[in-house]
Amino acid sequence: MLISRTYFPARRYFVASSPSTQITWCLPLRIIRTDRLRTWIIDISLTSVIMAPNLFGTSASLFLEASQQNLIQEKSTTEKTNTPKLDTQKSLRSKSKYKWNIVWRNVIAFLYLHISAVYGLYLCFTGAKLCTVIYTFVIGFIAAFGVTAGAHRLWAHKSYKAKWPMRVILMICQTIAFQNHIYEWVRDHRVHHKFTDTDADPHNAQRGFFFSHIGWLMLKKHPDVIKKGAMIDMSDLEKDPVVVWQRRLYIVLMPLFCFIIPTWIPWHFWGERPMYAWYLTLFRYTLSLNLTWLVNSAAHIWGMKPFDSSISPTDSYSVGIAAIGEGWHNYHHVFPWDYKAAELGNYKVNFTTAIIDGFAKLGWAYDLKTASVEMIQKRAARTGDGSRYKLIEDQHEHTHNDAVWGWDDSDMIPEDIQETRILNKSD
């Protein structure tokens, strides 16, 4: 006969006990932590605990972290098992055991880069030739395009398809940007979309502006990032020869395309001083890094949330300009498979979309996926903040169970697939 039961919503921990039969049920046996004393309960007899077969790999012992104060009383070997007294008021969310492990190599490198970038900016106005300055910004734009149109919209979100010449061009441009090879960039970004603002998010904005902007690259990854990253489907990139080739030769390609060639060209073709060319290269690289990082930091803190008010990403016009079209981040997290990464259909501040459309006219980009007007309006009216569309209802609560990283994500609902518009379809 069931005498007592307790349910912990925070951890979905269920305890049911019957003193008359000395049986205690603990389902689904998830770990409970409190902010004070903790204990481990081990080697509990089968006569005391009933578990589903093969659930934990063994039926002879139960490992359960619990509050010594609130969960269980000490059991005597000659007396009946006492019913655990559970206090739901003191069952708090578990505290993270994660400790910062600073990667000092990266810290020193970022210090050097930013100091050099300041000097490079100074040279733009004092010593460097005008051709070098113009060339620096052109290369910066080309590198940014490799990230936004390539690593981001093509490979991470599969928002469109590209023929091999375009993929090779995008791969070279992304290598110039030097933000890790495509495979690692995509894996981290897909994890970011699936687990935004959790410990599994590589640049979790809940840990502050500095961490989400640059600090996450100065620390070793949180264990959850590695754990969840291993669950992300990357089979499409493993079959892409362009991605595989870049990853295999990245240690050679990266310094060549990012630093050596961009420094050599001004010196060789119009006689720029090698030192000036080098520091303007570092200025270009550091500037492009910070403009990209603004999407992770500023676009998760300041701005409007017209499409989903329960998530941290925001729509930011200024970030959109700086990141050549990546600033409409609230829209992007709601519709990550939209090749425009924005509701906007014009090219005023979404240069990436303009270039993708240009390649589509050449036939190199195809199957461009975009959300229909009806989809956008319906979603904004249901979950937005009312800043752009009239809010009809707002009873949703954001969970990561329905988050998707892009097209072909297994969690993508059929309704979204059916209502998506596909432009320039392949034959």
Image (cartoon, rainbow, N blue to C red):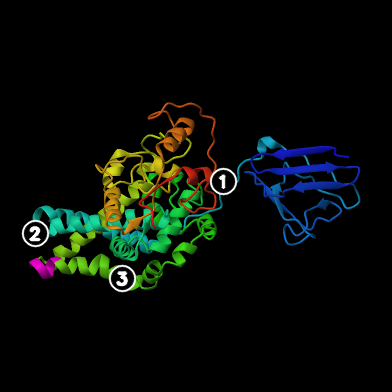
Q: Which residue lies under the disc numbered 3?
A: 253
Q: Position of residue 192 (x, y in %)?
A: 46, 51
> Does residue 253 appear left or right of residue 122 in this picture?
right
How many other residues sit within 10 Å of disc 2, few (<14), some (14-19) or many (≥20)?
A: some
Q: Nearer the viewer, residue 378 or 177?
A: 378
Tag 1 near tag 3, CB within 8 Å: no
Q: Quarter of the image containing the N terminus?
A: top right
Please give the range of residues in magenta: 266-271
Q: Position of residue 349 (x, y in %)?
A: 26, 43
Q: Position of residue 141 (x, y in %)?
A: 23, 55
Residue 411 among those drawn in magenta = no
Give the numbered dot on residue 401: 1
How many other residues sit within 10 Å of disc 1, few (<14), some (14-19) or many (≥20)?
A: few
Q: Earlier in the sequence, mark 2 or mark 3?
A: 2
Depth-wise, is mark 2 or mark 1 nearer the camera?
A: 1
**Picture quadrant where residue 243 is located:** bottom left
Q: CA distance from mark 1 to mark 3?
A: 38 Å
Tag 2 near tag 3, CB within 8 Å: no
Q: CA distance from mark 2 to mark 1?
A: 54 Å
Label 2 residue SS:
loop
Q: Earlier in the sequence, mark 2 or mark 1?
A: 2
Please name the amino acid that badge 3 sits on.
Answer: Leu
Please name the amino acid that badge 2 sits on.
Answer: Lys
